[in-house]
Amino acid sequence: MKRLKLVMILLGLATVTANAQFTKAELQVSGLNCALCAKTTENSLRALPFIQDVKPDLMHNIYVITFKSDKPVNFDQISNIVHEENFFISFLKATFNFDNVKVTNNYFSSHGANYKLVNADKPLSGEVAFILVDKGFAPRSVTKKYSGLTVNDDPAKTGRIYHVAI
């Protein structure tokens, strides 16, 4: 009986961890001029260990990315791939499951990275889509719009801090 309780507790903890993560993203890339460029970028994205699938929409230069549930997502690697191919990110809209995630002072964490909500005004639960507003993830006009909200980061936060807007 004690073993059964222990197994159920461990399964419950695993479920909490599995819920707290990124599920998908939409990545719009500017500068794609041909199908070969788009295919090369798609293949480079597919090679990342945390990406499960990439579906390109070449009419809008958007890649719909599905993330693996058991791997931490690294948005800097996505940005680096796009920039190494000599293209630019027009926007990166990610979907995060906020079930069982604590948001404190507009910060939340996932797999060692910190995320600051620059315009949060309501409690978050379930899947919520937001855009990354840091340089390299959005056009200059967007990063400039939120620049005043990204300078006063919590000094107690260690590691990478991404700034996101809902």
Image (cartoon, rainbow, N blue to C red):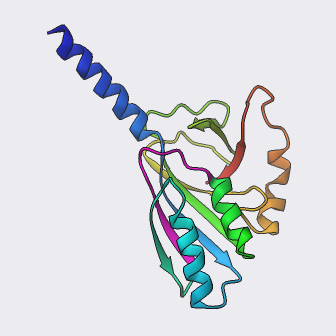
Left or right of 150? Residue 52 is left
Residue 111 is drawn in which quadrant?
Answer: top right
Location of residue 112 with respect to 165 vertically, above or below: above
Q: Is residue 43 visible?
A: yes
Residue 61 visible here:
no
Q: Residue at position x 34%, y 34% from top?
A: 15
Where is residue 44 drawn, in percent x and y? Answer: 58, 69
Could you say where residue 112 lies in the image, as x and y percent from the top left?
Answer: 61, 35
Q: Residue at x 50, y 66 (%)?
A: 46
Judge left or right: residue 139 versus residue 100.
right
Residue 94, percent from left and from top: 55, 57
- Whether residue 151 appears in magenta in the rendering, the answer is no
Q: Quadrant of the C terminus?
A: bottom right
Q: Magenta segment range?
A: 62-74
The residue at the point 26 percent across, 15 percent down is: 6
Image: 21 above or below 4: below
Whole-percent x and y of residue 113? 64, 39
- Looking at the image, the residue that sits furthest to the bottom is 34
- Is 45 placed above or below 158 here? below
